Amino acid sequence: MTTRPMIRKLMFAATMAFACASYLGAQTDNAEMKPKNNVRPAIKWNRFDYVCENGAQITVFLHDTTAKVSFQDHVYMMRQTASADGNRYSDGKTVWWGKGEGGFLQEDAPEGDGKMIVKDCELQKRAALESITGTITYLARMALPPQTTIQVRLLDISRADAPAVVIAEEKLTLGGKQVPLPFTLNFNPGKIDEKHTYSVSARVTIGTELKFLTDKAYPVLTNGNPSRVDLILKPAGAAKP
């Protein structure tokens, strides 16, 4: 016959077993609920800045055998391909060919004679680049669509009897921003002559339609002029020729 003390011992043992099972189950659930770190580490790109013909700028990011080439409003994702000379990257339609401290961007063609997109690119040391900063605005009461393109140029206007020489150029896509729009225009100080006169110009286009532009010179850098300038653009139809 089972005595009362024996029954109490059995009940105590059963209670402890249940408690242990509940605790272990809770620990298992908590372990499963802990977030897992599945985030991949960010790719480390090596950046190279080039200044090309007419002051055009191109930036090349390299990682292993992959190249990300940024020119104007387009980014080309490319893979390294076989080359007897220099480093060649292609996406099948466009090729970036880096040779020494130079390079060029052209349409990819079997014979290597594709249409040149930009050439005479020279590698710039980032520390050697200087910049002009400022804002772009206009007085007309209108909002611009996101696809609006803004072109900012640093010009050598020293010779009155010759066209201005482009020293540096930057193209921006407006996105969702509106004026006043800040800008930074990088340039190679080695191309600046203290005896020359320089100015910043800007143009605003929507598709192929010119909407606003600077109608006067905004002197910078030399002759006591600053490296910051605030541009006020005029409607294209009202600007001075």
Image: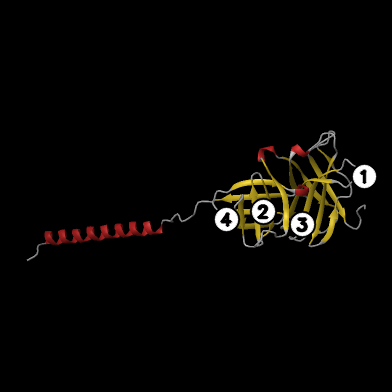
Left or right: where 226 falls relative to 40: right
Distance of mark 3 from mark 4, alpha carbons? Answer: 36 Å
SS state under label 2: strand
Q: Nearer the viewer, mark 2 or mark 4?
A: 4
The x and y percentages for residue 38 are: 46, 56
- Label 2 crowd bin: few (<14), some (14–19), many (20+), radius 10 Å: some
* Residue hosting label 4: 82
* Residue hosting label 3: 149
Tell me if label 2 and label 1 are in contact, CB under 8 Å: no
* Residue hosting label 1: 161
Distance of mark 2 from mark 3, alpha carbons? Answer: 16 Å
Q: Is residue 68 above or below residue 157?
A: below
Mark closest to the chain's N terminus, 3 or 1 = 3
Q: Residue at x 69, y 46 (%)?
A: 50
Mark closest to the chain's N terminus, 4 or 1 = 4
Mark closest to the chain's N terminus, 2 or 1 = 2
Q: Residue at x 74, y 61 (%)?
A: 147
Q: Name which residue type carries label 3.
A: Thr
Q: Is residue 203 above or below residue 125?
A: below
Q: Name which residue type carries label 4.
A: Ala
> Which of the pair 235/127 is nearer the observer?
127
SS state under label 1: loop
Q: Name which residue type carries label 2.
A: Ser
SS state under label 3: strand
Distance of mark 2 from mark 4, alpha carbons? Answer: 22 Å
Q: Nearer the viewer, mark 3 or mark 1?
A: 1
Q: Residue at x 25, y 61 (%)?
A: 18
Tell me if label 2 and label 3 are in contact, CB under 8 Å: no
Left or right: where 36 falls relative to 133: left
Q: Residue at x 85, y 37 (%)?
A: 196
* Residue hosting label 2: 70
Left or right: where 50 falls relative to 201: left
